[in-house]
């Protein structure tokens, strides 16, 4: 992800989350190289951004901090392919454990993570707002 990508990323972010990140948050991720790994997913034929994934790697632990696919491109196996590729990249880079947080009501994402062998490790009470909801912490060894 680069600064010029942010308008396209925000379009997806705003239709994907009830509390979307602001442009400045994405900019912060871009400059936080070495800890933050922000990637866009490009459609080869349409040459447009159809999703993004951001993860933080701190020593051997990885936290997926943001991940979305444009609604027009969901349900086609793209999210799963991206996650599998990211997991491989993290493994190659020495990561040993990956975590993420997800709304319990986000059944699509939970189903994807379960398919990828993530397990529920716990919950953070009232982590999300508008609407308030706990976060499920999911993770898997690599
Ligand atoms: C979660 C998300 C990234 C999945 O991306 P996707 O490209 O649509 O997912 P895929 O087509 O690769 O689906 C892979 C698996 O995810 C699950 N899944 C995807 N969409 C689903 C849906 N609508 N209902 C239930 N399960 C679903 C299924 O397990 C599916 O496997 P299957 O096809 O064998 O049933 C996408 O729905 C999204 O961007 N959602 C909004 C943002 C978001 O919630 N991000 C995650 C925050 S933690």
Image: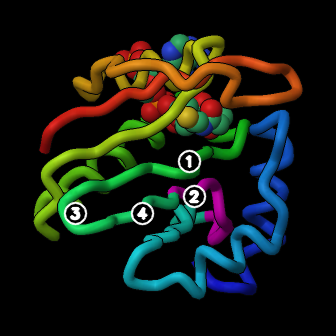
Which residue lies under the disc numbered 1? 67
Whether the residues at callouts 2 and 1 have beta carbons within 8 Å, the answer is yes
Whether the residues at callouts 4 and 1 have beta carbons within 8 Å, the answer is no
Q: Which residue: 77% across, 37% down?
A: 17
Q: Look at the image and name its color scheme.
A: rainbow
Horizontal arrangement in the rendering, residue 55 relative to residue 23 (left or right): left
* Quarter of the rendering occupied by the N terminus: bottom right
Mark 4 → mark 2, Cα distance in angstroms = 14 Å
Which residue lies under the disc numbered 4? 56
Q: Is residue 76 visible?
A: no
- Which label lies toward us, 4 or 2? 4
Which residue lies under the disc numbered 3? 89
The residue stretch that appears in magenta: 46-53
In primary-sequence order, the first of circles 2 and 1 is 2
Mark 4 → mark 3, Cα distance in angstroms = 13 Å
Mark 2 → mark 1, Cα distance in angstroms = 6 Å
Q: Residues within 10 Å of mark 2 (few under 14, many from 20)?
A: many
Q: Which residue: 65% across, 12% down?
A: 105
Horizontal arrangement in the rendering, residue 51 relative to residue 11 (left or right): left
* Quarter of the rendering occupied by the C terminus: top left
| Relative image position of residue 122 (x, y in whole percent) | 40, 19
Mark 3 → mark 1, Cα distance in angstroms = 16 Å
In primary-sequence order, the first of circles 4 and 3 is 4
């Amino acid at each position: 992800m680069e600064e010029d990508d942010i308008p396209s990323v925000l379009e997806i972010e705003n239709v994907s989350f009830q509390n979307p990140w602001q442009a400045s948050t994405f900019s912060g991720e871009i400059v936080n190289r070495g800890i933050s790994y922000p990637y866009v997913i490009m459609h080869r034929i349409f040459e447009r951004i159809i999703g993004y994934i951001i993860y933080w790697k701190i020593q051997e632990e990885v936290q997926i901090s943001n991940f979305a696919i444009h609604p027009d491109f969901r349900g086609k196996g793209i999210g799963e392919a991206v996650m599998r590729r990211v997991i491989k990249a993290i493994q190659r880079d020495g990561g040993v454990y990956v975590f993420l947080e997800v709304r319990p009501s986000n059944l699509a994402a939970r189903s994807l993570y379960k398919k990828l062998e993530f397990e529920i490790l716990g919950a953070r009470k009232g982590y999300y707002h508008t609407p308030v909801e706990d976060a499920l912490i999911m993770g898997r060894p690599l």
